[in-house]
C-alpha cells in the first residue's frame, strides 16, 4: 500500500487532473454528506452526487473543483473519476452562474416545470457561485 | 485593345480577391481542425474508461442480458429513427452530398418506416425538401459541437425510444479517416447490443485484435475485488446514458473534424485554381499589352514614313 492515491479526473473534453493525492473527498450520491477516500481504500465502483471534489495534494495544499455527478472507480491505489462536467474555480463564469441560479429559482416556483431538473440546475449554480467566491 | 486590357486587369483583381478569401478559409479550417482533433482524442480516452467500467459492472450483476436496461430491448414500434449529421455551411466539397445520399440509400435499404432527426442546416434542408418525416432538428454547431448538444440529442432520442415511438436508432455521419478522406458511415445506437457495448462505435481504430476496447485481464482482476455501491444494476443504469450521449458526441466530433478537413481541402484546391487562373490571365494581359505597344509603334513608324 502506498501513501498516496493516483487519481485521474476525466471528462469527455479533457483530463481535468492527473496525479498523486493524500486523500480526496467527493459528495456522496443519494445521502447527504461527503465521501472521503484514503490510500488503501477497498476497490469499489460508485456514483457521485452533485457538488465538489476536494483534493489534498502531496505538498500539503488543497485544490477544489466542481464535480456535478459522475462515476468513481477505485482500484487499489488508483482512482478514476468519470464525469461530464468538472471545472476549476477560476474557470467559472460567475455572471452566468448567477443568471442560471435566478432562472432555476423561477422555474422551481412554477409548478408545471420539471422539478428534478430545475432543482439540479439550482444546485449546480449555487455550487459554482460558492466555489468561485471561496477562491476569489 | 485598351478595353480588353482593362477587362483582363479587372478579372485578375477579382480572382486575386477570391483567392485571398479561399486562402483565409483554408487557414481557419486547418486551425479549427487541429482543435477538433484534440477534442476527439480526449473523448476517446473518456470512452475507454466508461466502457471498461461498464464491463466490470456487468460482470458483477446477478441478472444478465435482457433485464439490464430497457435500452437493450426492442420495443413494439415499427419506426426507425435516423440521426443524420451534416454541416451548417457549404464550401466543403462533397462532404454533405456524400453523407446525405448515403443516408437515403441506407434508409431505403434497412428500414420500412424511416424518421429523420436532422443535425446541421444542410441535413435539415435536404430532408425537408424531400418531404421526409422529421422528428427533430438541431443546427448551428456543426463545426464546433458541444457536449450539451450531444446530451440534448441524446435525451430527445431516448425519450422517443422510451415512449415507444421508435424502435431502432441509427446515426449517419461522416467518419474522419484522415485529412484527405472522410467516409459516410452508419451505426446502430438503440437498442444497444452486447457487441456495441465493448467498442467505441465511432472510432474503431483504437480497438484490439478481438475487436474490443476492453482489457480483459484488467477487468477480470478488478471484478474479483470490487464492491458496488449501491449495487451493480443501479450503476449500470447510471452508465448507459453516459455511454449513449458520449457515442453521439463522438459522432458529432468526427463529423466536425471531417467537415473542417473537407473544407480545408476544397479551399486549398480553390486557392490553387485561383493561382493558375491568375497566371494565365497575366499571360493574356502581357500579350495584349505587347500587342498594343507593337501596334502603336507600327502606327508611329508608318506615320513617319508618310511624312518623309
Image: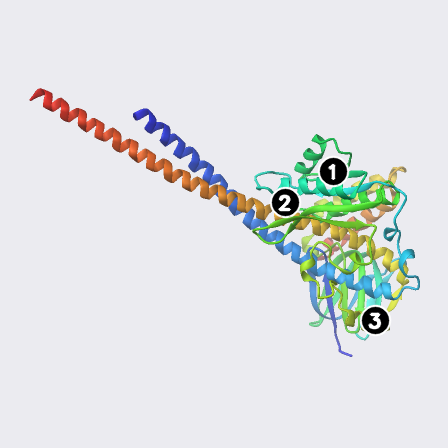
| Residue at 71 percent of width and 66 percent of height | B209
List x then y, in percent, for residue A40: 81, 75
The quadrant in which the N terminus of chain A is found is: bottom right
List x then y, in percent, for residue A12: 71, 56
Categorize mark 1 by other alpha carbons within 10 Å: few (<14), some (14-19), many (20+): some
Residue position marked by numbered label 1 in the rendering: B137
Task: Provide the chain ID for the residue under circle 3.
Answer: A
The residue most toward the top is: B307
CA gap, disc 2 and disc 3: 41 Å
Task: Provide the chain ID for the residue under circle 1.
Answer: B
Q: Is residue B172 left or right of residue A32?
A: left
CA gap, disc 3 and disc 1: 43 Å
| Residue at 63 percent of width and 39 percent of height | B97
The label nearer to you, 2 versus 3, is: 2
Categorize mark 2 by other alpha carbons within 10 Å: few (<14), some (14-19), many (20+): many
Residue position marked by numbered label 3 in the rendering: A43
Q: Is residue B18 left or right of residue B204?
A: left
CA gap, disc 2 and disc 1: 16 Å
Up the image or down, A46 lies above or below A1; here it is above
Residue position marked by numbered label 2 in the rendering: B143
Amino acid at each position: 500500500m502506498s501513501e498516496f492515491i493516483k487519481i485521474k479526473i476525466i471528462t469527455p473534453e479533457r483530463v481535468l487532473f492527473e496525479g498523486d493525492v493524500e486523500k480526496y473527498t467527493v459528495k456522496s450520491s443519494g445521502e447527504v454528506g461527503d465521501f472521503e477516500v484514503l490510500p488503501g481504500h477497498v476497490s469499489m465502483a460508485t456514483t457521485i452526487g452533485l457538488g465538489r471534489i476536494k483534493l489534498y495534494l502531496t505538498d500539503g495544499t488543497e485544490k477544489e473543483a466542481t464535480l456535478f455527478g459522475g462515476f468513481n472507480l477505485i482500484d487499489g491505489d488508483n482512482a478514476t473519476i468519470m464525469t461530464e462536467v468538472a471545472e476549476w474555480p477560476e474557470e467559472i463564469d460567475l455572471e452566468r452562474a448567477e443568471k442560471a441560479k435566478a432562472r432555476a429559482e423561477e422555474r422551481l416556483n412554477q409548478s408545471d416545470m420539471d422539478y428534478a431538473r430545475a432543482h439540479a440546475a439550482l444546485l449546480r449554480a449555487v455550487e459554482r457561485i460558492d466555489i468561485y467566491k471561496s477562491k476569489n | 485593345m485598351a478595353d480588353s486590357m482593362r477587362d483582363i486587369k479587372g478579372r485578375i483583381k477579382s480572382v486575386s480577391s477570391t483567392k485571398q478569401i479561399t486562402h483565409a478559409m483554408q487557414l481557419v479550417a486547418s486551425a479549427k481542425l487541429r482543435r477538433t482533433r484534440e477534442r476527439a482524442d480526449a473523448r476517446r480516452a473518456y470512452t475507454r474508461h466508461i466502457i471498461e467500467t461498464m464491463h466490470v459492472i456487468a460482470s458483477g450483476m446477478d441478472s444478465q442480458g435482457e433485464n439490464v436496461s430497457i435500452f437493450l430491448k426492442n420495443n413494439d414500434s415499427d419506426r426507425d429513427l435516423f440521426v443524420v449529421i451534416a454541416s451548417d455551411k457549404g464550401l466543403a466539397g462533397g462532404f454533405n452530398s456524400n453523407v446525405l445520399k448515403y443516408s437515403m440509400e441506407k434508409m431505403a435499404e434497412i428500414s420500412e418506416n424511416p424518421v429523420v432527426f436532422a443535425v446541421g442546416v444542410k441535413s435539415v434542408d435536404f430532408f425537408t425538401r424531400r418531404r421526409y418525416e422529421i422528428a427533430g432538428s438541431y443546427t448551428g454547431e456543426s463545426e464546433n459541437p458541444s457536449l450539451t448538444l450531444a446530451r440534448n440529442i441524446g435525451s430527445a432520442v431516448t425519450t422517443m425510444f422510451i415512449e415507444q415511438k421508435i424502435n431502432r436508432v441509427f446515426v449517419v455521419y461522416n467518419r474522419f479517416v484522415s485529412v484527405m478522406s472522410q467516409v459516410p458511415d452508419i451505426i446502430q445506437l438503440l437498442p444497444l447490443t452486447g457487441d456495441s457495448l465493448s467498442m467505441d462505435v465511432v472510432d474503431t481504430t483504437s480497438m484490439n485484435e478481438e475487436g474490443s476496447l476492453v482489457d480483459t485481464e484488467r477487468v477480470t482482476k478488478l471484478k474479483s475485488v470490487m464492491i458496488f455501491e449501491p449495487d451493480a444494476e443501479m450503476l449500470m443504469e447510471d452508465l448507459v446514458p453516459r455511454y449513449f450521449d458520449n457515442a453521439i458526441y463522438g459522432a458529432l466530433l468526427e463529423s466536425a473534424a471531417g467537415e473542417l478537413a473537407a473544407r480545408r481541402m476544397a479551399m486549398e484546391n480553390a486557392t490553387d485554381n485561383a493561382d493558375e487562373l491568375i497566371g494565365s490571365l497575366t499571360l493574356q494581359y502581357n500579350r495584349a499589352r505587347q500587342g498594343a505597344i507593337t501596334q502603336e509603334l507600327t502606327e508611329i513608324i508608318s506615320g513617319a514614313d508618310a511624312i518623309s
